[in-house]
């Protein structure tokens, strides 16, 4: 029995969903431990193409138990919509294969609204939120002003708790933003709509996972976004509001005693970034357009065109370190086949000096990329299934990246399908 975490090394959208989908059949449990409906994992399998936001990617595997831990932002609206979409494709989702922590806090209707109001107030200084309510949710959680999913089983107490929260929250909505206050009737209607749908899945996931450990079961932890969006270690303030790093998985799943043996860090063969914030390697114009088209780089949640550029070794090495990755999955190598030469950012220049270190957030906007070019391979690699099948230049690119980031590349992905993968 080994436990594993699959995490993003960069800005998110590295292809974690396809890696989890590939590997989950070897695990008994798949656990989401942070984040909410604000990002998307794209999974392509025999049932079709899915953009998962909250559901763990193990949902497609019959014998896997999927867990939403206490660390997630439990958004009932998004979750129920997502469950319906997945069920429509013939996949069973029931209380046996989906478990929600009784200590997961509910993302309430005012969280989404406050997210939008704050982005509007920030105007041209906005953080690039997907407006799914995540930042207001987590700040309320840390102020102890959210309700647990487990409170749905105590309706009287829940009503009292919500009316207290409502009174407090309306102060902000009305006095800070000048917006229309919420009413208790609205909130009760909302609870009425979702409580019975959510309750069957709610349980003590800490107990469940502790028992699983005792019985020799294996657990996979599935992260959302990437190292550079981590609340503590990312490119503040353009981060998400939770910890996207593997070390948070034991806490966010409800099982702090769990030991993670393997941390698979997912890195895309080039860089992409959604939203605002410094993105040192960014390309613009036709060069960017070509890469964006080749990689289909449009947000899974919002459809927004992603910012693109060459692989950033400085940011990636830092990402590997903060995730404590034990192995790397390099995805989308096939996308680079159109390039005559492959650009890589090997260093930054900061204050006139070359550096290998990823800068402190306040210094990051001044960093300039140093680009090196490696030979291209010029042929389609999507049918390669062994490392030796890859053209020499593609092998060299992988080995170059491996050496620079200081972590073994154990998987090379050459297409979105489950079997388009090379294992080393
Ligand atoms: P995630 O949030 O990290 O799971 O990433 P996304 O799902 O947002 O983005 C990854 C996208 O790349 C999805 O559309 C995947 O189907 C696709 N993808 C993943 N791996 C590969 C690959 O190796 N090659 C190609 N061409 N597409 C891939």
Image: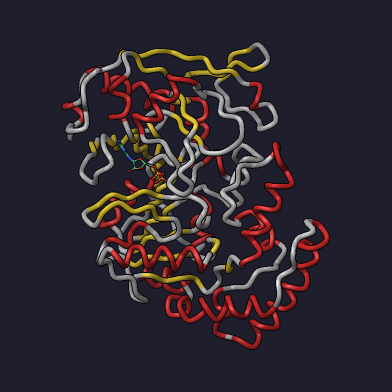
What is the x, y in percent for residue 310?
A: 44, 23
**Residue 270 quadrant:** top left
Residue that appears at 47% across and 36% down: 305
- Name the image quarter holding the C terminus: top left
Residue that appears at 65% across and 39% down: 236
How many numbered tags mark residues here? Answer: 0
What is the x, y in percent for residue 1?
A: 30, 59
Residue 165 or 110: which is nearer the viewer? 110
Residue 184 or 374: which is nearer the viewer? 184
Relative to residue 268, is residue 203 depicted above or below?
Answer: below
User: Looking at the image, in which quadrant does ligand 1 appear?
Assistant: top left
Residue 416 or 113: which is nearer the viewer? 113
Relative to residue 44, is residue 89 depicted above or below?
Answer: below
Relative to residue 163, is residue 224 depicted above or below?
Answer: above
Residue that appears at 66% across and 31% down: 360
Left or right placement of residue 212 versus residue 357 in this view? left
Residue 217 visible in the displayed image? no
Find the residue positioned furthest to the right: 175
Left or right placement of residue 194 versus residue 201 in this view? right
**Colour pattern of the rendering:** secondary structure
Find the residue positioned furthest to the bottom: 156
Residue 193 or 233: which is nearer the viewer? 193
Relative to residue 198, is residue 371 depicted above or below?
Answer: above
Find the residue positioned furthest to the front: 180
Residue 125 visible in the displayed image? yes
What is the x, y in percent for residue 154?
A: 59, 86
Residue that appears at 60% across and 55% down: 134
What is the x, y in percent for residue 155?
A: 60, 86
């Amino acid at each position: 029995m080994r436990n594993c975490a699959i995490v993003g090394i960069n800005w998110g959208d590295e292809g974690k969903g396809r890696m989890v989908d590939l590997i989950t059949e070897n695990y008994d449990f798949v656990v989401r431990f942070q984040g909410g409906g604000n990002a998307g994992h794209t999974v392509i399998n025999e049932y079709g193409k899915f953009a998962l936001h909250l559901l763990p990617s193990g949902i497609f595997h019959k014998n896997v138990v999927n867990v939403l831990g206490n660390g997630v932002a439990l958004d009932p609206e998004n979750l129920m919509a997502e469950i319906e979409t997945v069920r429509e494709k013939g996949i069973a989702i029931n209380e046996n294969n989906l478990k929600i922590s009784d200590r997961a806090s509910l993302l309430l209707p005012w969280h989404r609204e406050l997210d939008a109001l704050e982005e509007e107030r920030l105007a041209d200084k906005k953080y690039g939120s997907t407006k799914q309510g995540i930042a207001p949710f987590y700040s309320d959680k840390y102020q102890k002003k959210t309700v647990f999913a487990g409170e749905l089983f105590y309706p009287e107490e829940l009503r009292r708790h919500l009316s207290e929260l409502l009174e407090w929250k309306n102060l902000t909505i009305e006095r800070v933003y000048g917006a229309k206050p919420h009413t208790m009737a609205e909130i009760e209607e909302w609870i009425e709509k979702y409580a019975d749908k959510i309750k069957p899945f709610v349980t003590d996931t800490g107990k469940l996972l502790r028992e699983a450990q005792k019985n020799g079961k294996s657990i996979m932890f599935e992260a959302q976004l990437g190292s550079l969006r981590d609340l503590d270690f990312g490119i503040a303030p353009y981060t998400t509001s939770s910890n996207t790093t593997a070390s948070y998985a034991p806490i966010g799943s409800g099982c702090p005693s769990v030991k993670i043996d393997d941390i698979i860090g997912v890195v895309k063969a080039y860089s992409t970034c959604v939203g605002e914030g410094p993105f040192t390697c960014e390309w613009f114009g036709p060069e960017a357009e070509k890469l964006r088209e080749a990689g289909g780089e449009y947000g899974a949640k919002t459809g927004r065109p992603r910012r693109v550029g060459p692989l950033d070794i400085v940011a990636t090495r830092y990402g590997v370190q903060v995730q404590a990755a034990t192995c790397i999955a390099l995805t989308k190598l096939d996308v680079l086949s159109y390039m005559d030469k492959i650009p890589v950012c090997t260093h930054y220049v900061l204050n006139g000096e070359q550096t290998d270190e990823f800068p402190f957030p306040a210094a990051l906007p001044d960093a300039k990329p140093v680009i090196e070019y490696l030979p291209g391979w010029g042929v389609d690699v999507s049918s390669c299934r062994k490392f030796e099948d890859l053209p020499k230049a593609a092998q060299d690119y992988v080995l170059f990246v491996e050496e620079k980031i200081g972590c073994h590349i154990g998987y090379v992905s050459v297409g979105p399908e489950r079997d388009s993968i090379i294992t080393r």
